[in-house]
Image (tube, rainbow, N blue to C red):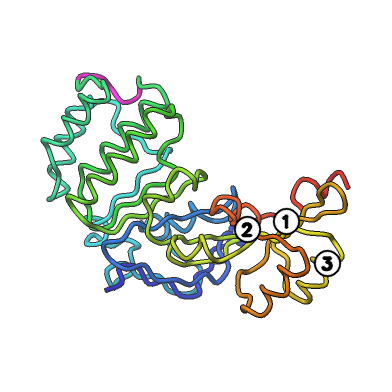
Amino acid sequence: MNVIECKDVTKNYKRKKALNSISFQIEENKITGLVGRNGAGKTTLLKIIAGYMKEDSGELQVFGESPFNNLMASANTIFIHDQMEFSPALNLKEIFEAAENFYEKWDRERSFRLLHYFSLDPKQYYKRLSKGMKSTFNMIFGLSANCTLTIFDEPTTGMDAAVRKDFYRALLKDYLDNPRTIILSSHHLNEIEDLIEDLLLIKDGKELLYMPIADLKEWAIAVIGKSNVVNEWIGNKEMIHSKDMVQDQVYVVVRNDFSKVELEKAYKAGIKFSPVSSTDLCVYLTSKTKGGIDDVFS
């Protein structure tokens, strides 16, 4: 069953297309990573999924219905982001008590255990927390709600390395205890790739790649060798990334779809191969130039 159905969704901000005919489907009980550079449209997409705003064209459904102004979707969805605000009149304990009245699956015991673990005083007021502590509280709030659709948009903003590590561990353990659909948006793919099952990579408001994270690791390959030899062997294949090395060597990243005959020919020509990390591949795919920052100095 698909929890989210997105078809040709477009969203405009004045003259800029934040989303440009993006289409995808997200299945239930999976952790999906949403990755893209700043301005790629990640937060806009998540706001539409969460029902905070409506698409300009196309169709997006959550639980089979439009999420905008939809009480059923709101009751079963939680959207955690770094612009969240809670009532300044309530302390952390009172915020939890109010949430318990809205979210029917709220885990009271776990919420306070996490609060204690992360050294947050239930009598503290949210507005007096540091940025990192606010992110930590938001994370606890999102996990404790146990919503069928749980969305985290850059949830570790302001957290130090140790707290980020604990958050990801808590997210995984909580998911194993209570499987549900989770979308995790992050700039740090290297931190979340062991958590997520599927990756949705977007650029300029469009889906660039959407596949299981295990497949992404085999999707591209780095080719290393003499420039003329590599260029001849690659032929008309599209280069994802290219970098000049010493002694007329070149490092080129291309799709990993070569036949055995092609690979044997490459080995005989002295070409070497190297795997490409998921993080590097996403950087290369979303870069404006094939050579990255090196092109500025060429």
Q: Is 216 or 150 nearer to us in this picture?
A: 216
Q: Is residue 130 located in the magenta-colored stretch of the structure?
A: no
Say whether marks 3 and 2 touch (CB < 8 Å): no
Placement of 237 over or under 230, stated as above or below: below
Coordinates of residue 210 in the picture (x, y in percent): 48, 67
Q: Is residue 49 visible?
A: yes
Distance CA(mark 1)–CA(mark 2):
23 Å
Q: Is 288 or 46 nearer to us in this picture?
A: 288
Q: Is 266 or 116 nearer to us in this picture?
A: 266
Q: Mark 2 points at which residue?
A: 14
Segment colored magenta: 123-127
Horizontal side of 166 relative to 281 (left or right) equals left
Q: Mark 1 points at which residue?
A: 288
Placement of 124 over or under 42, stated as above or below: above
The amino acid sitting under disc 3 is Val
Disc 2 element:
loop
